[in-house]
Amino acid sequence: MKIAYQHILNFLEVKPDIEELSSKLFQLGHEHEFDNLVFDMEFTPNRGDCLSVYGLVRDLNVFYKTNLDIPIYSDDLTELKLNFINKAEDACTHISFLNIEIKGNISEYKDYLKNYFNDLNLNRINFFTDVSNYVAYEMGQPTHSYDFPSIGDDITLKISRNNTQFNTLLGNSIDLDDSDLVFTSNEKVINLSGIMGGSETACSHKTKNVLVECAYFKPESIIGKAVKYNLHSDASHKFERGTDPKSHEKALRRFIQIVEDHCEITNLGLYKYEGPGYQEVELDFNSKKVNDILGLDISEDSYKNSLIKLGFDVNQTVKVPSYRSDINHQNDLAEELARVIGYDNIPVSSIKLKEVANKFDSSIERKIKAFLVDHNFVEVINSSFCSVSNPNSIKVDNPLDSNREYIRTNLTDSLALNVIYNEKRQKDSIKFFEISDVYSSKQNLSSEKKLAIIISGRRGENYLDFSKKLDKKYLTQLFQKIDIDVDEYFININREQLDSKIKTPIFAIELLIDDLGEEFNNYVPINNHLSDFNKYIPISEFPSSYRDLSFSIKKSSKIKQVINTLAETKSEFIKYSFMFDFYENKQINESKIGYRFIFQSDNRTLTDIEINKEIKKITNSVLSIESVSLPGS
Amino acid sequence: MSSDKDIISPKISIEKGSLHPINHMKDSIMDLLRSLGFEIIHGPELETEEYNFDMLNIKESHPARQMHDTFYVNNKQNVLRTHTSPVQIRGMLNNKPPLAFISGGKVYRKDDDATHLPMFHQVEGIYVDEKVTFSQLKDLIYKIIYSLFGNEVKLRFRPSYFPFTEPSAEVDILSEDGKWLEILGCGIVNPLVLENCNIDSSKFSGLAFGLGVERIAMLMHGVSDIREFYKSNLDFLRQFK
């Protein structure tokens, strides 16, 4: 909600600068940003009472002397004869209707009304709607203004019938259902309660006779309706967060005052409906309890003064004002005191928990992960949602989209997609694993924790593994190291069902974590896997290219220099490099080195000319080393 | 001295794989909390509304329970848990105070953009004993944040709202560019929640806190788009060795 800085200052006797005010608002728990002297407030859902200038200033009263006496119409009001029937007392316990008739035209708005529109950059609609909006902004109570003559003989509040058509004042037509609370007149819906009025009874510039509805709706009866019909309004937001059931007469008297400030009123009448429902909350005044919750030692007087400044009536008990529906027990009062003191000003007191027997997690899951990472596997986390179902799949009732309609029943399908994704990015050595719960509709929803591993391509990017393929034998031998036979867990991956032209076979296993266990207990990780947190270097989405270079070296004493020269070669476009071949011919005392360079730009696709230029530099550098030549030259 | 005839094959450094940065972060946070005295407990990702909402004082009218915020399954009989708090409920129901539990794992909300995903990770903790206070909660939070971000980091506590804690707070740290960044939520366990778990709230009180793992990982690693974590891109994942 946007609130202008100046509009707050109008209620404060001392005028703090905007930075100071911002800091106080944060202390009170009112998160916001500000720009051009306008606060963009983000109130927590329990503080519907702050959704107005008046409400916010009530909270600021703990820091500043405030003047909350808004000018209101103070004369007696005659009773309005209205045929109102409330068939939804549970949802609406308090409601008032005010009839105002005016004479003449409104030529110009008074400064306070003008400033509201100008300071918040809002558009005017028509006089009565503008006043309605202003009262909601200033006092927090939404009202709806009907063009009175366009309403029929009665007004009824009730639950709608299914498939009832309603034309909103924004001009769209919606089909209501039997969960919607509506106002009807002559059996026709004139207002979707708490959300938006109808087009047929809306005020216009010509309206001289208005009926202002001012209601309290229980949040439960309003929540979800604005989203359901995509009809978000300031009123719906306020009603969802809770309004003050006891504020109606003051809000309507303020409404009259504003109208009177602008034109002559010829007729006034007020209809009030107050059903059962509102019960004043009264809590013990117990400063010890509140101190115990916070870990403080605040005096009774100090605690009492804090509550009084926030509008509580404190004597032997604490009477909670009607606008604070969020206060129901001592912990709520403790939070009030903490806000006044400032959370940051509450001293820290030492906490010491009993030590747990084993300070570090030595679970099988952690050991499995360590084993796989030690063997150059990369862990992935895939989405639990998928588009493909099987007879045991659990369907999401309200999926984000059709691609995420089911909860996956296996991990391998996602891992296969991970392989394809990386192959498309020129990766030819892929070793992934994932550990996750999977769910099935069997036995009225059951879960299993599984490990899945997938491999494809070269075994590694070093000269010993470069020519070897990742295959079934590799995985089998890997798990034999810890005496586990994984033969029965292999899953056939059919490339034809994947979006891939590459023919390299893919191998995968998937098994229950519970099927692994004791074998991993004795595994001692080679690496410390929970080490530092690297800063991430953004990855390029442009294609990479590689070039292989081979060199013959006659003098073995120069091998190290050649390798170092190649390894230390850096440039803007070299993503990484590795030695994929090393061959020694002892008979002729000659070695051969094969080195691969992967090139990629962060912002474009590299041309052959650019890459060849880089290669030439590297080649020249290495060939300058004694006894090094290009094979065959 | 080696002669030209002694060819020594170059050494191969063992290539190490990598943990997923989110699990890495989650496990690091869990280890930290274990070292402070918390015990790990686990719970299901498919939950009942009772454990995910009702027991936590999240009333039927709360927006979080709407279909646009929560994933429902099994003809609305179950939800994909929206937080790891129901695990704490199970922990409190099955144990007597004093108790100190942490739980971590996947949680689900109906969001999908550069900073929110429908599936993300949380770590939550709860401590229930006699005379647990807000000032002790602050001590614990300082310990957690200093361990994660170093002792020099500036932090602030702001009042906030969670139905299951009262008072509730959000904690921000001051970033290098002078902006306050929200790091975690915490508070004193709402006595109604203790009573729901058959814990006498006149005798015991508790503190609770929760961290979004992705948020911390994004800050620590400098990742600006949360979706990067879940593309399974080798160039990305191999950076977190």
Image: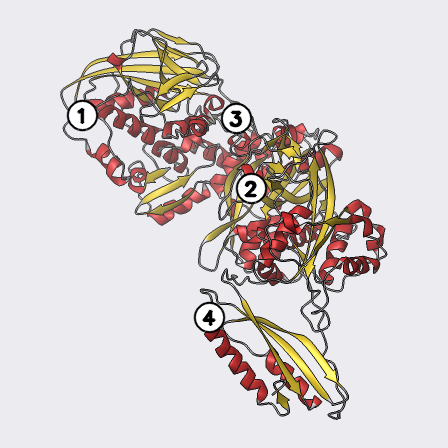
Circles 1 and 3: CB atoms closer than 8 Å = no
- Kindly identify the amino acid type of the residue bearing the numbered disc 2: Pro
Percent position of residue A12, x then y: 32, 38
Which chain hosts label 3? B
CA separation, marks 4 and 3?
60 Å
Q: Residues within 10 Å of mark 1 (few under 14, many from 20)?
A: some
Which chain hosts label 4? A
Query: SS for tag 4?
Result: loop
Name the residue tied to disc 3.
Answer: B61
Which color scheme is applied? secondary structure
Indicate which disc, 3 or 2, sits on the residue closer to the N terminus: 3
Q: Is residue A81 left or right of residue A45?
A: left
Discs 4/3, front:
4
Circles 3 and 2: CB atoms closer than 8 Å = no
Indicate which disc, 1 or 4, sits on the residue closer to the N terminus: 1
CA separation, marks 1 and 4?
73 Å
Q: Is residue B187 above or below residue A247?
A: below
Query: SS for tag 1?
Result: helix
Name the residue tied to disc 2.
Answer: B118
Residue found at x 70% / y 73%: A463
- Which mark, residue A262? 1
